[in-house]
Image (spheres, grey):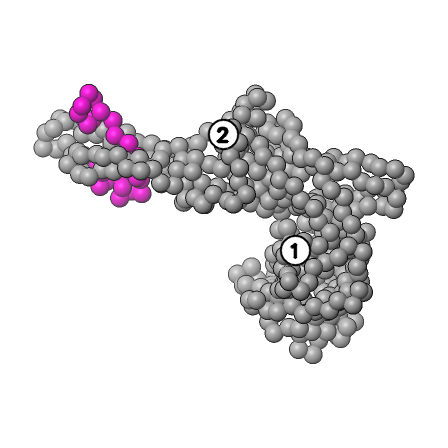
Amino acid sequence: MHKSLPVIGILLVFLTTCIDPYPLNLSDYESLLVVEGLVTDRNAPYTIKLSRTFSDKDNEPEKVTGALVEVTGDDGSNVLFSESQPGVYTSDPDRFRGIPGTTYVLHIKTGNNEYASDPVLMQPVPDIDTITFSKDREFINDGTEEAEGIRMYVTSTVKQGNATYLRWAFEETWKIESPYPIAYQYLGHGNVISIPVKNHICWKEDVSTNIITLSVPPGAGQRTITQPLTFIDTKRSDRLSEQYSILVKQYSISAQEYNFWDNLKQVSEERGDIFDKQPCFVSGNIHSLTHKQEKVLGFFQVSSVTEKRYYVTRKDIIALHLPLYRHSCKVVEIGPVDFANPGGPRAPSFDDLYNRYTGMGYVFVYPLYNGLSLERLAFATIKCADCSVTANPEKPDFWIDLP
């Protein structure tokens, strides 16, 4: 029999459908099975990830390989998940797609140990009506400073009857431009030519990590709900420097899953000294059939999902009279003229300056002339000249450039 854990050695941080273990060193540490799984009504492969908790932050979580993973439904469906990579088990989208109104159970067998989830009913999900934004403020830096920006919202109409439970996640994509694109090439001996610009426009991506849920109490008729999603500081974040897109995913969840997320949120947000509430075990819906007292971390999620995409442009931010993002780029403009005795034996040549600054990690970005004569070379840090250093130069398939 497994001994109990007075203080759990893991907090779960969910990235859409992923769980990353956060370790704590415990003298009575024991390895626990961690299960990550989500089945929806989308036509896509579903994944179940199996790993074990770890006690040392320098160690990687142990992947659970060679397991038998199966999902059964009360409609007679029975689907085996194949191991696509160590610890990751994937379904075939051509053979399995979740159906609202169906109850599913996750079954796992690892060696001589068997686990199963509670039966989970896939609830229908209301459509997303609109995604909007408005001007807002938020305190940052531990409440010592106030930031201006926009707050994103999602609005849905809920047909009331029984209580409704919803969860949201979102994916962000935004366009950026290099403030000092590489449009010239230095050939040496003071000769400069123009070249086609590359990696001038790129796209960044991010996924939500905060837990966003809502319980809509039972009632008659319909109710319109508006849920805040995220705040964007327009001065400090480059998300709105050009154009921004958010893909909002709205999930229907059970009351049990709502309580799981709510408890997880309380545990993950707890801060303070030893007299504050201590982290505790967040009970999920997966249990050991072999050892009844064994604790299992994670939750088998079964959710209908609907999604909607929305764009915000730089013009929208200007119209709200919000502060704009400014690149903090270091540019050096320098030439032999900037040294004592220019043209003399001690003055560096253009070649000397070019080799010096490119050797320091800068890139040549443009020339400066005095009439027809080259006077200086301009150098910028690489991240300010080539956006592929921090982002993807490939335009996403879904992306629409707005005027």
Q: Nearer the viewer, residue 282 or 209?
A: 209
Using the rendered view, name the quadrant where residue 364 is placed: top left
| Within-10-Å neighbours for mark 1: few <14, some 14–19, many 20+ | few
- Residue 289 placement (x, y as % from top left): 77, 72
- The x and y percentages for residue 173 are 54, 41
For the residue pair 395 and 27, the one nearer the viewer reads as 395
Residue that extends furthest to the front in the rendered view of this protein: 94
Tell me what residue is drawn at x 49 percent, y 32 percent: 242
Point out the tag, 2 or 1, that comes first from the N-terminus.
1
- Can residue 118 be seen in the rendering of this structure? no
Secondary structure at badge 2 equals loop
Residue that numbered label 2 is attached to? 325
- Residue 355 drawn in magenta: yes
Residue 274 placement, left or right of 179: right
Question: What span is in magenta?
Answer: 352-375
Residue 68 is at least partly visible in this image: yes
At 36% from the left and 33% from the top, the residue drawn is: 180
Q: Secondary structure at mark 1?
A: loop
Q: Amino acid at mark 2?
A: Tyr
Determine which quarter of the picture holds residue 122: bottom right
Q: Which residue is mark 1?
A: 43
Closer to the camera in the image, 71 or 237: 71
C-alpha span from label 2 to label 1 = 39 Å
Q: Residue at x 65, y 30 (%)?
A: 133
Please name which of the two marks, 2 or 1, marks the residue nearer to the observer.
1
